[in-house]
Image (cartoon, rainbow, N blue to C red):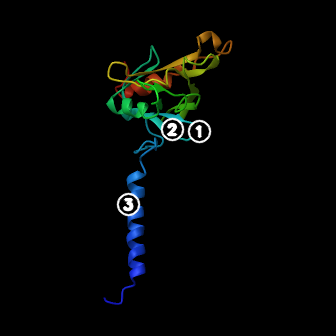
Amino acid sequence: MTDRNPRLALSSIAAAAFGAALLAAGPLGCHADPNPRPGEGFALVRMDTGDIVLSDRDLAGYDSGRHELVLNDRGIERWNSYIRFDRSFDPPIPKLGGLYQKEFSFRIGGEEIYRGRFWSMASSQGLADVVVLDVLFPLNQERNRVRFQFGYPTPGFASPGAVDPRDDPRIAAYFREAGLLE
């Protein structure tokens, strides 16, 4: 035991400390769902990264008439983790970035039902897509809904004759079966 290599022991300690630091820092700044269940349930997926922004575990309900996800506390926390602030102002103001202008996929059972974009009323650009507005503002207990709108700033911006993908019957059927349909 006295012939241990001190250099080897030191490198082992350094490697262990580095590994512990990686494990501790890993979740910070990572938005991917910590418990993904590919092919199961509902998922709102950010297309550029594949992150599951929201899943059925983040929901208290789904309002099919208004096309709104009603978020539980976990969902509010996850949603707010994507919002960035310029803290040089008092109070801090939301910054462009995060989810803004990113493409999403609305999925049920691993199957894409439709695509859209995360957007903001701060934009003057019209879109024919489904959009999620107000991605620059945090949610809370009173304001806990994520709304999907067809066309921005109004449905009139959707392509003429386009079918509203939010009305896909698989959406209401899933949320009804999951006990989340309002």
Which residue lies under the disc numbered 2? Answer: 110
Q: Nearer the viewer, residue 53 or 166?
A: 53
What's the amino acid at mark 2?
Answer: Gly
Q: Nearer the viewer, residue 70 or 11?
A: 11
Graded by Cα atoms within 10 Å as few (under 14), some (14 to 19) or many (20 or more), the crowding at tag 3 reads few
Residue 24 in the image: above or below residue 43: below
Q: In 3D space, how far apart are the residues under numbered discs 2 and 1 (Cα atoms)?
A: 17 Å
Residue 152 in the image: above or below residue 38: above
Q: Earlier in the sequence, mark 2 or mark 1?
A: 1
Quadrant where the image shows the C terminus: top left
Q: In 3D space, how far apart are the residues under numbered discs 3 and 2 (Cα atoms)?
A: 34 Å
Which residue lies under the disc numbered 1? Answer: 48
Write down the quadrant of residue 131 in the picture: top right
Q: Earlier in the sequence, mark 3 or mark 2?
A: 3
Graded by Cα atoms within 10 Å as few (under 14), some (14 to 19) or many (20 or more), the crowding at tag 1 reads few
Residue 89 position within the rendered picture, expressed as x and y whole percent measured from the top left:
45, 26
Write down the quadrant of residue 6 in the picture: bottom left
Q: In 3D space, how far apart are the residues under numbered discs 3 and 1 (Cα atoms)?
A: 29 Å
Q: Secondary structure at mark 2?
A: loop
Which residue lies under the disc numbered 3? Answer: 20
Q: Secondary structure at mark 1?
A: loop
